[in-house]
Image (spheres, rainbow, N blue to C red):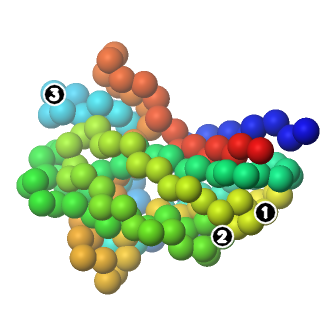
């Protein structure tokens, strides 16, 4: 019997050669300004591009796989206009999943998840990408949140979870 799998990724651990943005970034803010509304450390980048992350997945027969991350668009000082969204596409080993319109940057983001086809994951090394595509309707960068810096919040690494 295969046990459930869970992989956690720090948003700061992007692949440098594969994580590119056209305007600014990627960067990691490990000391966000809580007085301005920030609740978590976060990776951030402006306009369109992608973050790429490598991870190792166990061998197994998975019936369901979920990818979760706390996301928002990017705007200086967490003060986005209300319509400053970003359309974020998830790619797992080059397999694209439907875009999610993520909230405007508020310094804390919101959790988003995608159901991933188990056959798109390989036993061993894999690559996960969060992309704001050049042709997306809303392309206002991306923040990926991680460590809580405000007591009422919890850490939120990128997670890939599999069930048998």
In depth, the one of 92 and 12 nearer the eye is 92
Q: Which residue is mark 3?
A: 35
Spatial CA span between label 3 and label 2: 39 Å
- Which mark, residue 93? 2
Tell me which numbered mark, 1 or 3, is placed earlier along the sequence: 3
Which residue is the extreme one toward the right?
1
The residue labelled by disc 1 is 122
Q: In the rendered view, does 80 fall on the left or right side of 15?
A: left
Name the residue furthest top.
151
Is 150 above or below relative to 12?
Answer: above
Q: Are marks 1 and 2 in contact (CB under 8 Å)?
A: yes
Q: Position of residue 60 (x, y in %)?
A: 85, 51
Q: CA distance from mark 1 to mark 3?
A: 43 Å
Q: From the viewer's perspective, is the residue at label 3 or at label 2 nearer?
A: 2
- Residue at the (66%, 58%) spot, across then down: 54
Q: Earlier in the sequence, mark 3 or mark 2?
A: 3
Tell me what residue is drawn at x 40 percent, y 67 percent: 99
**Mark toward the start of the polypeptide (1 vs 2):** 2
């Amino acid at each position: 019997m295969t046990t459930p799998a869970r992989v956690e990724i720090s948003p700061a651990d992007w692949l440098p050669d594969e994580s590119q943005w056209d305007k600014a970034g990627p960067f990691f803010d490990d000391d966000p300004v809580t007085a301005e509304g920030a609740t978590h450390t976060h990776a951030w980048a402006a306009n369109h591009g992608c973050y790429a992350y490598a991870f190792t997945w166990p061998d197994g027969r998975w019936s369901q796989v979920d990818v979760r991350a706390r996301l928002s668009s990017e705007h200086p000082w967490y003060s986005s206009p209300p319509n400053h969204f970003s359309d974020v596409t998830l790619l797992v080993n080059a397999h694209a999943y439907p875009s999610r319109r993520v909230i405007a940057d508020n310094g804390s983001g919101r959790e988003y998840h995608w159901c991933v086809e188990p056959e798109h994951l390989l036993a061993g090394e894999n690559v996960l990408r969060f992309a704001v595509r050049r042709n997306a309707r809303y392309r206002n960068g991306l923040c990926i949140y991680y460590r809580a810096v405000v007591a009422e919040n919890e850490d939120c690494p990128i997670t890939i979870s599999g069930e048998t």
